Structures are given as structure tokens and as C-alpha cells.
Amino acid sequence: MDVLKFIELEGETSTIRNGASSPIAYLSSFDFAFTLHLMLTILGITHDLSQALQKKDQNIVNVIDLVKTTKLQLENMRKDGWNTLMHKTRVL
């Protein structure tokens, strides 16, 4: 953001300066912040499963348990996690 703001103020040409305005507006938008928080939440939930699936010596029973746990966590987030996600997005 700092670099884009600098370009917006100090860019060599008006085209360059104007070109920095649009990304600044998007990066400051609710949609962008919401998407980032959603991705962070989902990737946080699926991280352990992802790590387990990358190991060649992983026990299949453990992987099945991780799949079930991850699925349950994602279902809980889908059912009950929207208020928390919206709150995190609004705080910024």
C-alpha cells in the first residue's frame, strides 16, 4: 500500500499516477479484506491435513481421521463462523 500511495503521489506521468489509484481502492475494499480473512481461516483449518498428505510414510487411518476432523471444522465454520469472519473484516 505504501508503494502504491507513493506512486500515486510521485509517479513520473499522470498515467502512472492514475494507474496506482485503482489497486489502492481495491486493496482497501471490504471484498478484498473479507476474501483474505476467508482464505486465512480455510488455510488454517486445512493446514494439518495438507501437511499429513504430503508425508509418504503417513498411516492411512491417521489421514482418514484428519479428513474427518477437517471436514467437521469446515462445516462448523460454514454454519457458525460467518459472524466471526464478518467481525474480523469490519475491525480492519
Image: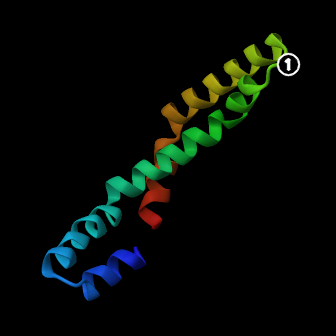
Q: Is residue 20 left or right of residue 80?
A: left
Pick whichever, 82 or 16, lies toward us.
16
Quarter of the figure with residue 60 = top right
- Position of residue 61 in the picture relative to residue 75 (left or right): right
Q: Which part of the image, by quadrant, shows the N terminus?
A: bottom left
The answer to whether residue 15 is left or right of residue 11 is left
75 or 19, which lies in front?
A: 19
Above-or-below relation of 59 to 19: above
Q: Which residue is mark 1?
A: 57
Q: Choose top left, top right, bottom left or bottom right for residue 49.
A: top right
Residue at 76% from the left image edge and 18% from the top image edge: 63
Q: Which residue appears at 70% of the width and 24% of the height?
A: 69
- Percent across and percent down for residue 40 are 55, 47
| Residue occupying image coordinates x 30% and y 69% | 24
Q: Position of residue 76 (x, y in %)?
A: 57, 31
Q: Farthest front residue?
A: 12
Q: Residue furthest left?
A: 14
